[in-house]
Image (cartoon, rainbow, N blue to C red):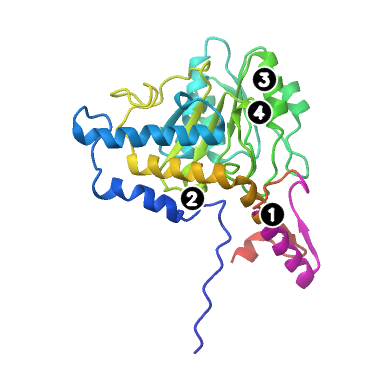
């Protein structure tokens, strides 16, 4: 019996393998450099320096100050910290949050959780191309609105949202703006100086770093409530002994992403379009989902005429 061919992995929006250079960078912190970076003795020196190097590497990708980066356990924690932290910090001002209907569950479920404590959420719809309208966001603003949270790019169809425009609206109204950038990091430019956001999240395992590590950008002028109380690590905003090997891996991955962004964007787009052209040539009756131009270079979502998505997955 002939051996079955190995499957082709097409779920990089779900998770990525670790880059070989990332594995090389983290190895010492799995083998010999085991010290606690918060320790004042000899064994804490190298891990402490490594954490701060990684903080600079992440900040370099986002074009921000290293002091505006805190490390978390991943994108879900970053989403929880950003949304609940701002909601609690600004409770005296208002209790209204604006988000979209296509956010990741780690955003939608946090909003629903806060609704149990008196917060109200407006869920903005998207058009047939998966795009949020900035005018819909503006129309939804109330005097009690304290937070707008819209993802940078959608993980299913790849549509890139008009974050810069929405951020300008938020700033004019004195509202905090947050974006979940887990899917856009390493695929398109994510400089916070251009996006204009107050908070932005990263998930390590979407950018060739280890699982269980993430980061949250917090603009210096923005102060959410603490997410985790304890010994005061991460500028006092997120207590807990640092995941040094994960942090080192995330830092290295962000350094590589910043260095190779333009080249990788072109390569991913070539592969995406090649896949679509091949499917169209062989099958004919398919339709691309999402925005035709404003979408991630690595993401292809297609509909097959007469077939349901669940049947195809089966």
- Residue 16 screen position, x and y as percent: 50, 53
Residue placed under numbered mark 4 in the picture: 194
**First along the sequence among labels 3 and 1:** 3
Q: Residues within 10 Å of mark 4 (few under 14, many from 20)?
A: few
Residue placed under numbered mark 3 in the picture: 170
Task: Look at 42% across and 33% down and name the residue there.
Answer: 71
**First along the sequence among labels 2 and 3:** 3
Magenta-colored segment: predominant secondary structure: helix
Left or right of 98? Residue 237 is left
Residue 158 numbered mark, or none = none
Residue placed under numbered mark 1 in the picture: 269
Residue placed under numbered mark 2 in the picture: 208
3 vs 1, front mark = 1
Cα separation between marks 1 and 4:
23 Å
Left or right of 313? Residue 78 is left
Identify the secondary structure beneath mark 4.
helix
Q: Is residue 75 visible?
A: yes
Do the numbered discs 1 and 4 sit on residues whose CB atoms are within 8 Å? no
| Residue segment shown in magenta | 268-293
Q: Is residue 20 magenta?
A: no
Q: Which residue is at the far top?
A: 92
Observer-nearest of 183 and 192: 192
Q: Residues within 10 Å of mark 3 (few under 14, many from 20)?
A: many
Cα separation between marks 2 and 4:
24 Å
Left or right of 210? Residue 262 is right
Observer-nearest of 122 and 235: 235
Do the numbered discs 2 and 4 sit on residues whose CB atoms are within 8 Å? no
Observer-nearest of 188 and 160: 188
- Residue 47 screen position, x and y as percent: 29, 37
- Residue 167 screen position, x and y as percent: 67, 24
């Amino acid at each position: 019996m002939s051996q079955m061919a190995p499957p082709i992995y097409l779920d990089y929006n779900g998770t990525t393998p670790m880059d070989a250079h990332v594995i090389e960078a983290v190895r010492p912190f799995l083998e010999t450099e085991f010290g606690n970076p918060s320790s004042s003795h000899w064994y804490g020196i190298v891990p402490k320096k490594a954490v701060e190097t990684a903080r600079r590497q992440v900040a370099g990708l986002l074009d921000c100050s290293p002091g505006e980066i805190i490390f978390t356990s991943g994108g879900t924690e970053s989403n929880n910290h950003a949304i609940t932290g701002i909601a609690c910090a600004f409770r005296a001002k208002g209790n209204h949050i604006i988000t979209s209907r296509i956010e990741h569950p780690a955003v939608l479920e946090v909003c629903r959780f806060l609704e149990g404590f008196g917060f109200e959420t407006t869920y903005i719809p998207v058009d047939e191309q998966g795009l949020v309208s900035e005018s819909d966001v503006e129309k939804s603003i109330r005097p009690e609105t304290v937070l707008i949270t819209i993802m940078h790019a959608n993980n299913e169809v790849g549509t890139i949202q008009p974050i810069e425009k929405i951020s300008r609206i938020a700033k004019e109204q004195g509202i905090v703006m947050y974006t979940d950038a887990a899917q856009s990091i390493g695929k398109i430019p994510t400089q916070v100086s251009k996006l204009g956001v107050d908070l932005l999240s990263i998930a390590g395992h979407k950018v060739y770093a280890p699982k269980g590590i993430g980061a949250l950008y917090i603009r210096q002028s923005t102060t959410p409530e603490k997410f985790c109380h304890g010994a005061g690590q991460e500028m006092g905003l997120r207590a807990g002994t640092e995941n040094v090997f994960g942090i080192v891996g995330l830092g290295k991955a962000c350094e590589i992403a910043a260095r190779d962004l333009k080249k990788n964007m072109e390569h991913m787009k070539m592969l995406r379009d090649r896949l679509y052209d091949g499917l169209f040539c062989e099958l004919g009756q398919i339709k691309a989902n999402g925005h035709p131009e404003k979408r991630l270079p690595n993401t292809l979502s297609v509909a097959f005429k007469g077939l349901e998505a669940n049947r195809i997955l089966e």
